[in-house]
Image (cartoon, helix red, strand yellow):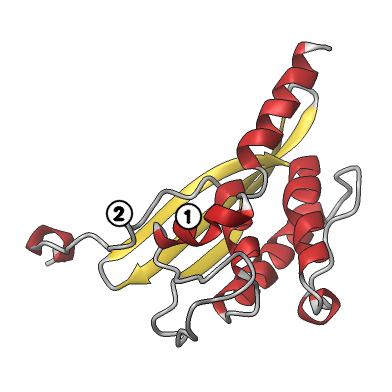
């Protein structure tokens, strides 16, 4: 087994799916309320549900013989609680660890992703645009409540999302959290 093989196994272990028994607890740290890996505990209005934005940033780059994509992520819980982050992923990681499980988990995959086909193999021309469209469709599916909790947990783990809540409770906003810079 080569060092590359070992690293790939580590990546897959770290970024893979969240175990079904802990999906609900895992999602609490992001402001979601799940009863199980398959069901939401209560219908949440779009206004109360955390909102996820996904896209690509600055195209792609080459490193160690692989093409990497910068994924721009934003998870918004409420007016004062949100996180933005960027994470780098290979196309093979996106396909095998996110796209394929999402496609397998969503009975209505073809309907929700009809206008956002996933990128082909080999990082051909147009891959970044296809990834951007597919990630936007995934975020819309999650934001609308159509994705089951297991898919939301998988997505957040794959993206290494920073936690928004501690023990399911959002942090209390302080006056400093609401200060904005104003040019004047």
In the image as oriented, which residue stretches furthest toward the top?
Answer: 2
Residue 49 placement (x, y as % from top left): 44, 77
Who is closer to the viewer here, 99 or 135? 99
Provide residue 32's location: percent of width, then percent of height: 45, 69
Report the residue marked by disc 1: 26
In the rendered image, is residue 181 in sight? no
Helix or strand or loop: what does disc 1 sit on? helix
Q: Quadrant of the C terminus?
A: bottom left
Residue at image x 78%, y 44%?
91
Q: Is residue 33 left or right of residue 62?
A: left
User: Dot 1: few (<14), some (14–19), or many (≥20) neighbours within 10 Å?
Assistant: many
In the picture of the structure, the residue carrying the numbered disc 2 is 166
Secondary structure of the residue carrying tag 2 is: loop
Q: For residue 125, which numbered disc appears in the image?
A: none
**Front residue (pair 53, 43):** 43
Q: Looking at the image, which residue sits at the far front?
A: 21
């Amino acid at each position: 087994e080569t060092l590359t093989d070992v690293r790939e196994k580590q990546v897959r272990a770290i970024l893979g799916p969240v175990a079904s028994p802990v999906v609900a607890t895992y999602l609490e740290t992001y402001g979601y309320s799940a009863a199980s890996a398959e069901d939401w505990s209560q219908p949440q209005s779009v206004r109360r549900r955390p909102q996820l934005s996904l896209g690509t940033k600055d195209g792609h780059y080459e490193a160690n013989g692989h093409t990497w994509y910068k994924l721009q992520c934003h998870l918004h819980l409420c007016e004062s609680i949100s996180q933005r982050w960027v994470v780098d992923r290979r196309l093979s990681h996106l396909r095998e660890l996110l796209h394929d499980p999402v496609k397998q988990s969503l009975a209505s995959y073809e309907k929700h992703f009809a206008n956002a086909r996933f990128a082909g193999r080999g990082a051909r021309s147009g891959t970044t645009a296809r990834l951007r469209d597919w990630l936007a469709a995934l975020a819309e599916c999650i934001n609308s409540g159509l994705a089951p909790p297991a898919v939301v947990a998988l997505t957040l783990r794959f993206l290494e999302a920073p936690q928004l809540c501690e023990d399911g409770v959002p942090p209390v906003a302080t006056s400093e959290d609401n200060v904005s810079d104003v040019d004047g």
